[in-house]
Image (spheres, grey):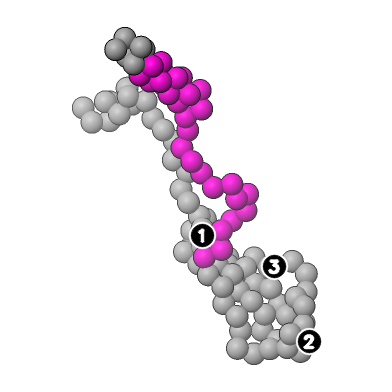
Amino acid sequence: MAKKFFYVCAGLFLLAGAYAMGARSAGAQSGSQQVVGLVASTQCSGGWMVITATGDVYHRQAIGECNTPMNGAPEYWGNFLGGTGPVKAQQGSWGQLKARYR
């Protein structure tokens, strides 16, 4: 019975150690902006418009007739949401929080 108890304790100890060494929240490994919308023009010479997750709009013009390759890099057209993207938040301390709500 003592042997079983030892194995359970050793397993919990190793699990806690593994968690302490490498615990962090999972995140995507994408280095670029995520595309959430893609609009193709109904005319052959119109090109493509792309909307990213932050609301940025990019346009890439097609050259010549239908089914031709795109020309150059996408052109930034502005932000669809009217802002500059996500708001940067700064984490405050407990003292700042207490002082705010006194």
Camera-side residue: 37 or 94? 37
- Would residue 22 be counted in the magenta stretch? yes
Q: Is residue 11 magenta?
A: yes
Q: Amino acid at mark 1?
A: Ala
Tag 2 residue: 64
Give, as a single range, the part of the protein colored magenta: 7-36
Quarter occupied by residue 19: top left
Asked whether the viewer can see residue 42, the reply is yes
Q: Which residue is mark 3?
A: 74
For badge 3, the amino acid type reads Pro
Image mark for residue 53: 1
Q: Residue at x 53, y 70 (%)?
A: 37
Q: Nearer the viewer, residue 42 or 80?
A: 42
Tell which residue pokes out farthest to the front in this image. Answer: 1
Marks 3 and 1, how far apart at CA = 16 Å
Confirm whether residue 20 shows in the render: no
Instruction: Identify which residue is drawn at 47% across, 64% down.
Output: 81
Q: CA distance from mark 2 to mark 3?
A: 17 Å
For disc 3, the neighbor class at 10 Å (few under 14, some 14 to 19, many from 20) is some
In the rendered image, residue 11, in percent from the top left (x then y), is placed at: 41, 20
Q: Is residue 90 left or right of residue 44?
A: left
Left or right relative to 74: residue 28: left
* Discs 3, 1 touching: Cβ within 8 Å: no
